[in-house]
Amino acid sequence: MINRAQAEREFLSMTQDMATGEQLKLDGLRRVTKKHARELELAQHAARQAYRSKARPVSIEDVRELFRIMNIPWTLGNSAGAVFRKEEWEWTGAMKATRKEAHARLISTWRLKEPRSGAQEGSSKGFR
């Protein structure tokens, strides 16, 4: 049986490891997004288009489908995780991936945030 001091030390160690892991993840995401900046920008545009055309939350699979329809090769790799990283997106939940290669993993679904009330389209004070 461990005492309170030992439990606190173990908890601190775990949270520090988690913080380090999160930082490593963010560092890696920054590297791959820099490498694929052009493709990422196109994918973010496609995500906005998918959301506006479907009027429902969208996932990375919707973005991939638009790329397929437009005959654009999917080269994002791990930087696909940054498509919905901008503050304009709000997480809505998760769904099982439908692509065979994804093995029914859970993937996030997203919606565009609504403009703040009183904000006018194109206003520098409102949402963009």
Image (cartoon, rainbow, N blue to C red):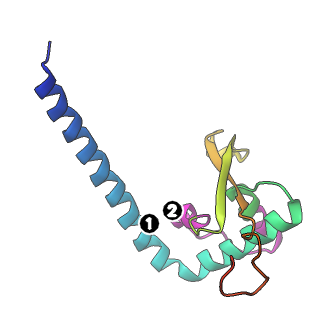
Q: Which residue is mark 1?
A: 29
Report how many numbered discs are placed on residues in the image. Answer: 2
Residue type at numbered disc 1? Leu
Start-end of magenta stretch: 65-84
Residue at x 32% of width, y 59% of height: 24
Identify which amino acid the numbered label 2 is placed on.
Asn
In this view, 92 is above or below 54: above
Would you name the residue on which mark 2 appears? Answer: 78
Q: Position of residue 117 (x, y in %)?
A: 76, 70
The answer to whether mark 1 and mark 2 are in CB contact below 8 A is: yes
Residue 51 lies, with reference to residue 3, above or below; the image says below
Element type at mark 1: helix
At horizontal 66% and vertical 38% (from top left) the residue drawn is 104
Residue 44 in the figure: left or right of residue 10:
right
Could you say which quadrant of the image residue 71 lies in? Answer: bottom right
Residue sitting nearer the eye, 108 or 123 = 123
Front one among 48 and 61: 48
Of pointers 1 and 2, the one earlier in the residue sequence: 1
Estimate how packed mark 1 is, as few (under 14), some (14 to 19) or many (20 or more) residues with alpha carbons within 10 Å. Answer: some
Mark 2, Cα crowd under 10 Å, few <14 / some 14-19 / many 20+, is few
Whether residue 25 is situated above or below residue 83 in the rendered picture: above
